[in-house]
Image (cartoon, rainbow, N blue to C red):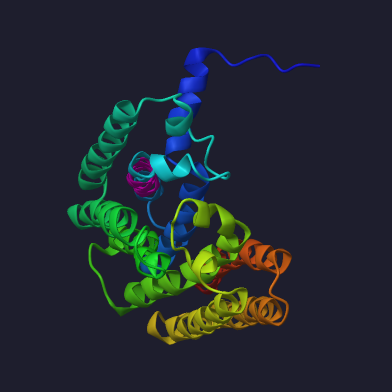
Amino acid sequence: MLKPAQSPLRSRVAGYVALTKPRIIELLLVTTVPTMVVAEKGIPSIWLMINTVIGGALAAGGANAINMYVDRDIDALMERTKNRPLVTGLIKPRNGLIFAIALEVIAFVWLTYWVNLLTACLGVAACLFYVFVYTLWLKRTSKSNIVIGGAAGAVPVLIGWTAVTNSLSWAPIVLFAVMFYWTPPHFWALAIKYKDDYSSADVPMLPSVASMKTTATRILLYTLLLWGLTLVFSPVADMGDIYLVSAIVLGGVFTWFAVRLLREPTTQRAMKVFTYSITYITLLFGAMALDVLVRNAR
């Protein structure tokens, strides 16, 4: 049975939504809310959480849309991205850029009014870094692109922290480092599957310019650094046993997946690392929030 065709308006709306990369936004928000719970040492105001999530989603969506605008030439060359709305012509580039900038402006105003100015500035700073440092510069010129560029994806934890405290301290900085070192093994594992895509678009993503063994070794090294940082976070943020045990176990499993990839560097193993990396970060931040809530309930 044939599915009914989408109306032009519905297709266009879906295209604009696709520009924001909703799945990436979901992952960023998974780290923001638990961070707010840790910063508050309890459950923050529901309205504060809602407004921070909305503002953070708008900021991340705008940055992702600008990324698609800039990368529309190489997206057309890659199998994985050739159906993106700016490549297919569903949305005109100019309209996509206007949409992206509008999201950023709304995000800044929203966070400034409903949260605080520091949080709003962090949201815009993440966008500028993602666009100018990663997308326009590093992505097409350096095999360390995702290593440095991943800093933009680590900013949501700072946004979550400052939304509650309107200040920064060592705890959110260590948490920022956790996300910074989580990004390369997470992304490189996926990039192994699409290394031919990156090669065809002349993008020097590590798996497309280095051997599988080199990539797997880097994944393992960054995973070990990540594991160490999650343990450092425990005393710095005064976390309890639930978090500490979770960090030890989850990091150990992540390392085990990375070791298996190094021993058997295949696409199948890489995708298992990628899949687990998402489970890992979700459970780790969930454990942070649970740790705080359980201790407060005693």
- In the figure, 216 relative to 187: above or below? below
Quadrant in which residue 258 is drawn: bottom right
Report whether residue 41 is seen: no
Say if the magenta span includes residue 60: yes
Residue 218 in the image, given as x and y percentages of width and height: 52, 79
Report whether residue 187 is seen: yes
Q: Where the C terminus falls, by quadrant? A: bottom right
Which residue does the image show at 47% across and 39% down from the upper left? 76
Q: Number of marks in the image? A: 0
Tell me which secondary structure the magenta stretch mostly adopts: helix
Residue 16 in the image, given as x and y percentages of width and height: 43, 30
Residue 81 in the image, given as x and y percentages of width and height: 52, 42
Which residue does the image show at 43% across and 37% down from the upper left? 19
Residue 288 in the image, given as x and y percentages of width and height: 51, 70
Quadrant in which residue 39 is drawn: bottom left
Chain part drawn in magenta: 52-65
Quadrant in which residue 186 is drawn: bottom right
Q: Where the N terminus falls, by quadrant? A: top right
Q: Residue furthest left?
A: 117
- In the figure, 201 relative to 138: above or below? above
Which residue does the image show at 39% across and 75% down from the upper left? 177
Horizontal side, residue 125 vs residue 236: left or right: left
- In the figure, 191 relative to 260: above or below? above
- In the figure, 233 relative to 142: above or below? below
Horizontal side, residue 115 vs residue 52: left or right: left
Say if the magenta span includes residue 283: no
